[in-house]
């Protein structure tokens, strides 16, 4: 897809800035109907003999999970099934699952599920390979931000939702219970070794899961597309200290723009009809390329705001997420503030936001204000069509929560620093007030 006028943003060099971006992706990415059944072949190719199959309890009882396990066993790979997977994982749940496998002799991991499952498998792999307290690996300032001393065991990721892109990224998201905040673990060794991306695995996703995961794709794409250019980050002396997230790149722009187009075209269809295979195919492909994009570019304000929104939830029980505890699914947590945040950011990267408006509405805009209004209108209508809340008040938040929400967002500096505008506490206060409704 040709993009207009962005090339010059990247042809920049000075002694004060870092002229390098890095793309880390799985060694093998396979995409197509039925490819999940090739997991045994891939495990055998990697020389694996005993793996942990990380899969949620409900999914573990399905035909898909049985096919994956059978494929592994037919290839001569023994399987330890781990079902202690919490949707929106927290540090306590991850450590509980780790205690179940810490004494097992494992030479690899297979993750079957959505982003929560794949992220859990990433963290279990990290802890099993290099045992330490989980907080040692959690990003600063919440944790110590330590990197493992070397590669992890092979991880084969089989996503069953078209959303997180976790099968392609170096990041795992985790809720720190004692702080009531979400954060992440990110380092180059976290990425899966193999990604088997099969659109057929998504046809059982219920409507709200389809909506939430699809909105996460859209936000990955818009945020990575509108991040500040990678050439604007400060020069580093030690390549090992280069951040996983670089800021916008020419390749990230291509991935992000196409993902936006496919989400706009196919998300409503996938939501309305789970057996619309064309919609499922292109939503899965959009999730994958958005993951390749934001996996090296990064995301910014909506995702930073989403972490405390999800971490502080008290009373929201969304349809199709019947787990017995309140939850704000990640895609919903990012989408509620997104429209309000984008509206305020259009003036700081007008060419990119203008392009997004053209992609989703087919109209040319002349000013940042017009771009912000058009994009906000598009976004709110999309949420309404998907029956997703459009304000924080709808999920139980009140004025008294604003200070804690702002403080929780300010902890996500690795994301906020990628915003096209330098984000202040006052900026966040104003966006949260808007999003409260």
Image (cartoon, rainbow, N blue to C red):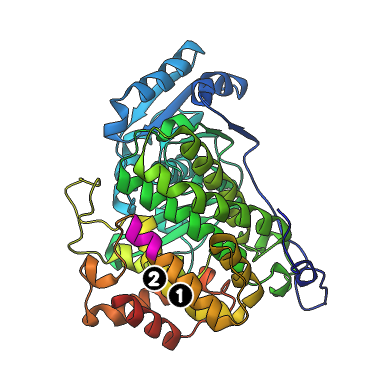
Give coordinates of residue 117: x percent, y percent: 39, 41
The residue lying at 37 percent from left, 52 percent from top is 212
Write the start and end of the magenta stretch as one range: 381-385
Residue 382 drawn in magenta: yes
Residue at image mark 2: 337
Residue at image mark 1: 341
| Gap in angstroms between the C-alphas marked 2 and 1 | 6 Å
The residue lying at 46 percent from left, 43 percent from top is 162
The residue lying at 51 percent from left, 49 percent from top is 265
Question: Residue reaching furthest bottom?
Answer: 426
Residue 291 drawn in magenta: no
* Image vertical order of residue 171 relative to residue 314, above or below: above
Residue 433 seen by the camera: yes
* Image vertical order of residue 181 relative to residue 345, above or below: above
14 vs 134, left or right, is: right
Dominant secondary structure of the residues highlighted in magenta in the image:
helix
- Mark 2, Cα crowd under 10 Å, few <14 / some 14-19 / many 20+, is many
Give coordinates of residue 139: x percent, y percent: 48, 63
Circles 2 and 1: CB atoms closer than 8 Å: yes
Residue 148 seen by the camera: no
Judging from the image, what secondary structure is the residue with disc 1 in? helix
Judging from the image, what secondary structure is the residue with disc 2 in? helix
């Amino acid at each position: 897809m040709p993009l207009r006028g962005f090339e010059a943003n990247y042809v920049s060099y000075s002694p004060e800035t870092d002229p390098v971006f890095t793309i880390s992706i799985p060694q093998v990415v396979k995409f197509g109907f039925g490819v999940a059944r090739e997991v045994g072949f891939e495990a055998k190719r990697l020389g694996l003999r005993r793996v942990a199959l990380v899969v949620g309890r409900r999914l573990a009882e399905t035909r898909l999970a049985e096919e994956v396990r059978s494929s592994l066993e037919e290839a001569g790979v023994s399987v330890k099934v781990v079902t202690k997977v919490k949707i929106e994982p927290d540090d306590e749940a991850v450590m509980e699952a780790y205690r179940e496998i810490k004494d097992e002799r494992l030479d690899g991991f297979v993750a079957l599920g959505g982003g929560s499952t794949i992220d859990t498998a990433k963290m279990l792999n990290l802890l099993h390979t290099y045992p330490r307290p989980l907080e040692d690996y959690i990003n600063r300032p919440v944790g110590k931000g330590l990197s493992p001393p070397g590669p992890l065991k092979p991880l084969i990721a089989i996503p069953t939702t078209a959303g997180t892109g976790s099968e392609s990224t170096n990041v795992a998201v985790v809720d720190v219970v004692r702080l009531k905040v979400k954060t992440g673990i990110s380092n180059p060794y976290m990425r899966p070794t193999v990604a088997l991306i099969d659109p057929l695995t998504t046809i059982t996703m219920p409507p709200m899961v389809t909506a939430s995961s699809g909105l996460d794709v859209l936000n990955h794409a818009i945020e990575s597309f509108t991040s500040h250019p990678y050439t604007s980050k400060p020069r580093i002396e030690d390549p090992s200290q280069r951040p996983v997230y670089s800021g916008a790149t020419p390749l990230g722009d291509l991935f992000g723009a196409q993902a936006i187009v496919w989400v706009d075209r196919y998300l409503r269809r996938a939501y309305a009809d789970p057996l619309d295979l064309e919609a499922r195919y292109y939503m899965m492909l959009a999730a994958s390329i958005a993951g390749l994009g934001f996996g090296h570019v990064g995301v910014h304000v909506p995702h930073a705001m989403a972490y405390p929104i999800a971490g502080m939830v008290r009373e929201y029980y969304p349809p199709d997420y019947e787990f017995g505890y309140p939850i704000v699914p990640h895609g919903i947590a990012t989408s509620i503030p997104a429209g309000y945040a984008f509206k305020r950011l259009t003036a700081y990267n007008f060419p990119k936001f203008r392009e997004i408006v053209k992609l989703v509405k087919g109209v040319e805009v002349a000013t940042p204000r017009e771009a912000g209004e058009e994009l906000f209108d598009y976004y709110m209508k999309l949420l309404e069509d998907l029956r997703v809340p459009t304000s924080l008040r709808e999920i139980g938040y009140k004025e008294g929560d604003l200070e804690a929400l702002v403080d929780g967002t300010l902890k996500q500096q690795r994301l906020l620093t990628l915003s096209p505008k330098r984000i202040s506490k006052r900026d966040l206060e104003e966006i949260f007030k808007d999003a409260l409704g």
